[in-house]
Image (tube, coloured by chain):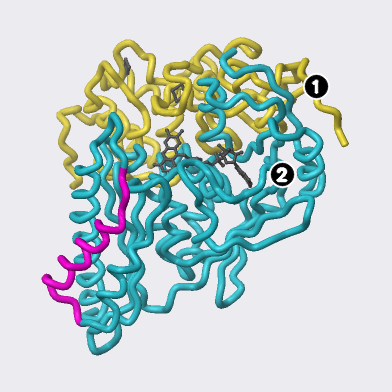
Chain colours: A yellow, B cyan
């Protein structure tokens, strides 16, 4: 039987493709671990109890609230944070769409929303506006009023499907519906 | 660092988990998906000395169709259960209810066993287990035992599990084929815990009579409420708007809501009436639609 230690234990996981191996206090949340021990400060921390979505990351390809997950629970997993979306200097099409449609103002909610939408579009490449709204309903944005986020997601979905040129106008109406 | 200091043991097997729980004593806590427990740790509403982490127990992550019953391992993630065709075929009320549990991100991590053991009276899973007369299987130093859902939920966030017992599986009787299900929930925002939710399942025979009906209410008492009296009014009868109204009133009579910052008791009682009526109306309408198809 392993002996528990209150002083800490080792965890290893992959963060944005890089293997990390750290000694952590077991009470450290994954969000603090990623920000403070891995330098992934794109993981934003808002409410710290699961309701705002700012801390959302991908854990083995699926979204997880990093504030509601202890670092020790992520042992052996693959984590993607917003830092892992861009390809070098090239923004991910989803980021590009947010930029183009003003899908962010202060940007605090943006990393969590981008990762949430990454999962949404992986499962549903052609969502309706209602599905987009439901998909981001666990992510609180206090700036944009959400409409520009919905526009950005719709446009990004089209680009990722390879059917569009990404020239959506952002008027809030979906011409395909 | 918001949670208080604690030890963490990653269980390597069910026996190891039980041994660790026993050794750590009353201040130990089981960690499943962490979607309820980690926020409680952060707010220091829970300050366990040791967390026994079931995260590595693949043996508790399964969905098994045994014909008459469906068995789901406690560590199966809610999202896995929600999207399983096997679950949808055997107990359609469960995926219908899971869609109301938080958001996809929460369901990716939260487990079916955690939802049952956490025993939040407003939670959907405990109400499904009550509605469908599920059994919960627990294991501890005295061996395994089976607990009927009716005896499992004790009070607000309390179950009849002993502190050294681990919930290992839930077993749900298969719903009769041709069953219709409906969940009516009122929450302030999508994904929030319900103020009140009514979960219903029915089987209506070819002559239009209600052969079987099950109604359970979340958020309107310290435990999920099974609306037995309402069910008795309905069984064997042909549904009419008057009958549905009478059943909704009986269902509301079975509740025992409290008042809190979210809603006064009277408001919840009214919600129970209205949501039961909507739930039953949908069950009847869905049956008509299925027959016409
Ligand atoms: C933003 C947000 C919204 C949510 N909305 C809803 C909602 O609308 N409806 C809803 O039902 N839930 C909701 N939840 C809670 C969510 O469903 C939790 O995942 C669930 O209640 C607990 O499951 P878990 O696996 O995360 O358990 P944990 O958080 O790990 O554990 C919860 C409790 O159960 C105990 N426990 C866990 N597993 C076992 C076991 N196998 N044996 C014995 N004890 C055990 C733990 O010791 C702890 O006390 C929400 C959570 C969040 C963060
Ligand atoms: S910081 Fe994690 S959900 Fe708000
Ligand atoms: S852009 Fe400021 S919170 Fe969303």
Was residue A30 drawn as part of the magenta stretch in this picture? no
Per the image, the residue denoted by label 1 is A5
Chain holding disc 1: A
Disc 2 to disc 1, how far (Cα)?
20 Å
Q: Chain of mark 2?
A: B
Which part of the image, by quadrant, shows the N terminus of chain B?
A: top right
Residue B150 locus on image (x, y percent) = 49, 61
Q: Main secondary structure of the magenta part?
A: helix
Does B252 lie within the magenta span? yes
Q: Badge 1: how crowded within 10 Å, few (<14), some, or many (20+)?
A: some
Query: Residue B164: which disc?
Result: 2
Q: Is residue A121 visible?
A: no
Spot occupied by residue B154 in the image (x, y as percentages of width and height): 50, 50
The quarter of the picture where residue B236 lies is bottom left
- Image quarter of residue A7: top right
Q: Nearer the viewer, residue B213 or B22?
A: B22
The residue shown at (54%, 17%) is A88
Percent across and percent down for residue B66 are: 61, 73
Q: Which residues are magenta?
A: B238-257
The residue lying toward the viewer, choosing from B120 and B279, is B120
């Amino acid at each position: 039987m392993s002996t528990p230690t209150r002083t800490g234990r080792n965890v290893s996981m992959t963060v944005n493709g890089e293997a990390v191996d750290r000694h952590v206090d077991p009470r450290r949340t994954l969000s603090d671990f990623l920000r403070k021990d891995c330098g992934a400060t794109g993981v934003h921390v808002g409410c710290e109890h699961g309701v705002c979505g700012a801390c959302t990351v991908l854990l083995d390809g699926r979204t997880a609230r990093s504030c509601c997950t202890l670092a020790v629970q992520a042992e052996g997993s693959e984590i993607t944070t917003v830092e892992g979306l861009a390809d070098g200097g090239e923004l991910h099409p989803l980021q590009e769409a947010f930029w183009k449609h003003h899908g962010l103002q202060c940007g605090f909610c943006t990393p969590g929303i981008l990762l949430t939408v990454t999962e949404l579009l992986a499962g549903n490449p052609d969502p309706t506006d209602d599905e987009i709204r439901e998909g981001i309903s666990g992510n609180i944005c206090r700036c944009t009023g959400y409409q520009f986020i919905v526009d950005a997601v719709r446009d990004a979905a089209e680009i990722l499907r390879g059917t569009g040129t990404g020239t959506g106008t952002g008027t809030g109406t979906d011409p395909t519906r | 660092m918001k949670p208080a200091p604690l030890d963490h043991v990653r269980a390597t097997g069910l026996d190891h988990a039980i041994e660790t729980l026993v050794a750590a004593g009353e201040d130990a806590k089981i960690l499943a998906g962490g979607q309820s427990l980690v926020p409680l740790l952060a707010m220091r509403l829970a300050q366990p000395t040791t967390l026994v982490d079931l995260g590595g127990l693949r043996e508790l992550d399964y969905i098994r169709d045994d014909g008459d019953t469906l068995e789901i391992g406690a560590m199966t993630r809610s999202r896995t259960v929600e999207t399983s065709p096997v679950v949808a075929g055997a107990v359609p009320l469960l995926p219908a209810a899971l869609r109301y549990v938080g958001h996809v991100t929460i369901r990716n991590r939260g487990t079916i066993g955690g939802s049952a053991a956490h025993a939040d009276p407003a939670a959907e899973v405990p109400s499904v287990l009550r509605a469908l007369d599920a059994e919960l299987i627990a294991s501890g130093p005295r061996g395994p035992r089976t607990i009927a859902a009716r005896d499992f939920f004790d009070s607000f966030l309390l179950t009849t599990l002993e502190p050294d017992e681990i919930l290992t599986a839930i077993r749900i009787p298969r719903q009769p084929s041709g069953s219709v299900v409906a969940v009516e929930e009122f929450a302030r925002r999508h994904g929030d815990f319900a103020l009140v939710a009514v979960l219903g399942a029915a089987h209506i025979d070819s002559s239009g009579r209600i052969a079987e009906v099950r109604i359970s209410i979340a958020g309107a008492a310290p435990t999920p409420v099974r609306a037995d009296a309402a069910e008795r009014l309905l069984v064997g009868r042909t549904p009419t708007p008057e009958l549905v109204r009478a059943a909704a009133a009986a269902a509301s009579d079975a509740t025992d809501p409290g008042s809190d910052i979210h809603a006064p008791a009277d408001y919840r009682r009214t919600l129970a009436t209205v949501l039961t009526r909507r739930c039953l109306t949908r069950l009847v309408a869905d049956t008509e639609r299925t027959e016409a198809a």
